[in-house]
Image: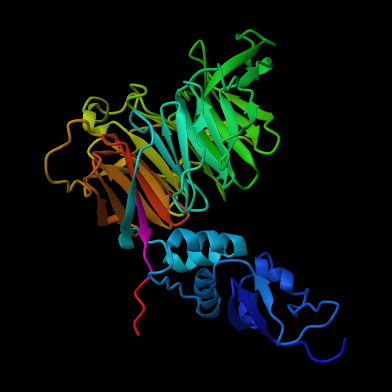
Amino acid sequence: MGGARPDRIRFNVGGQIFETTATTLANAGRNSFFGVIFDDNWDVLYNEGGFSQSQELFIDRNPDCFAVLLNLLRTGDLNIPPNVSEKSLYREASFYGILDHVRAAKWGQFDGNRLRLSRSVSGRAPGDGTAIRAGPDGGCCVAHGSIVHVYDWMLEEHPPLNLDHQRVNDVGFIDADNIVISACERLGTLDGGMGLFSSTTGELRYKFEVSHINSHENKDRDKGAKKGFTAGALCVNPDDYRIFSSCRGRSNEYGIGVWDQVTGKQMDFFYESPGWSLGDADKLQWLGGVYNCLLVATLFPRKDNCYISLLDFRSRDMVWSWSDIGAPLTLTVVDEKRVRDAVAMEEANSICVVNEYEDLGFMDLRMMMGSRSTSIGSIRWSSRSRLMKGVMPDEPCYPKLAVHGGQLFSSMNDCISVFCGSDWVLTSRLKRSYGGSICDFSIGGDRLFALHSEENVFDIWEVTPPPIIL
């Protein structure tokens, strides 16, 4: 086949003709629908009879959506005319394999100070929601009792995940296609207390065995016997495909289990040792980089005393722990100093905690590591965030913490505070009165999801791109 290969390409999409260039289509990427039109050098592929500029490649899809997506590949801007619905556009973008391009154009760079309320979604199950988790693709899942409702990036609901009347303890995304759930009882759907589900079909893919075989490390505990545990708080390490879960035995024994995401096999178990309390942990967080540890936090009111620990699974050692036991009376007696949540901020080399009145406290990670001792009362409290006005709700929720994009987020009543800078200055608040207090929130896929307790509703906050100035 001789002659130069043309750069111009004509499409017939649903009866409407479009003409573009290989250069424009190359912006879609090799894994897109358009990638199959090109060879490894991004030259247009020829058919047996040759290829000319007069030929048309027919695609039996929506031409209005194709026009929007083609303009996106040309300019990088997403301009949706009134005659095109967003859901139709997202479906077409998914077909062509360029949904990531649409996301990038729709969302600006994540900034808590520029978030705007996009929409609110009413709950689909009776009873209050207990947890919300953002997915890596901009979707989310919401736990209501024994049901987990899953929403994709277009906020369309997939088949729910049903645990047969077992209350959900925690839930988390492994990736966009898989969700792991821990339940209260070792009965029914999840015999092992944990299961991996398909996020799109709701199918239970496999169960995790939640147990521990006592070794010589625990000579005083039924040596050689396999003990059953109930899974609690979950954490996923995306770097090495590990799942962590807090575990509670029938005799109030505590530990941290580790499973392989791919095989579902248990890899390790960290048993609570005398003098080192783990408790029935409320929160787990993996710290990568220089720390390579798991943060384990047992918080009030789950337990009268708060425990925050760092576990190193390489040395199978608790490298640092903090507790309010033995701290000054102002810390242990005055209710406002009870720790309600904790989050590690790796870039700031610190752990942040929050109390019932949204006072923030900070502990320096650089002073912690290597101490191998229990630190007492080492929190530097700051009340700069106590700017709430109005009447406290009848049933306030305990505040939650999150870190994303170098910013710190803290929920309180029906709003979320945003803190920035090295001194964590309060810079803005995200407030939505409808639905009552916020019982949980989560950030992922450049969205913030806030779950309200009273009206069983969750809000979606997004960063909208700046307007186009003509």
- Where does the image place residue 123, in percent across and percent down from the top left? 36, 38
User: Most extreme residue toward the left, as rendered?
Assistant: 390
- Where does the image place residue 221, in percent across and percent down from the top left? 60, 9
Q: Is residue 463 magenta?
A: yes
Give whichever of 361, 111 is nearer the camera.
Answer: 111
User: Most extreme residue toward the front, as rendered?
Assistant: 15
**Residue at image coords 39%, 39%:** 342
Q: Label the magenta part by its dominant secondary structure.
A: strand
Q: Is residue 202 magenta?
A: no
The quadrant of the picture occupied by the C terminus is bottom left
Q: Which residues are magenta?
A: 460-465
Q: Is residue 391 left or right of residue 273?
A: left
Q: Quadrant of residue 28?
A: bottom right
Give whichever of 393, 304 is nearer the camera.
Answer: 393
What's the image's color scheme?
Answer: rainbow
86 lies above or below 438: below
User: Most extreme residue toward the right, as rendered?
Assistant: 1
Number of on-image labels:
0
Q: Quadrant of residue 53?
A: bottom right
230 lies above or below 153: above
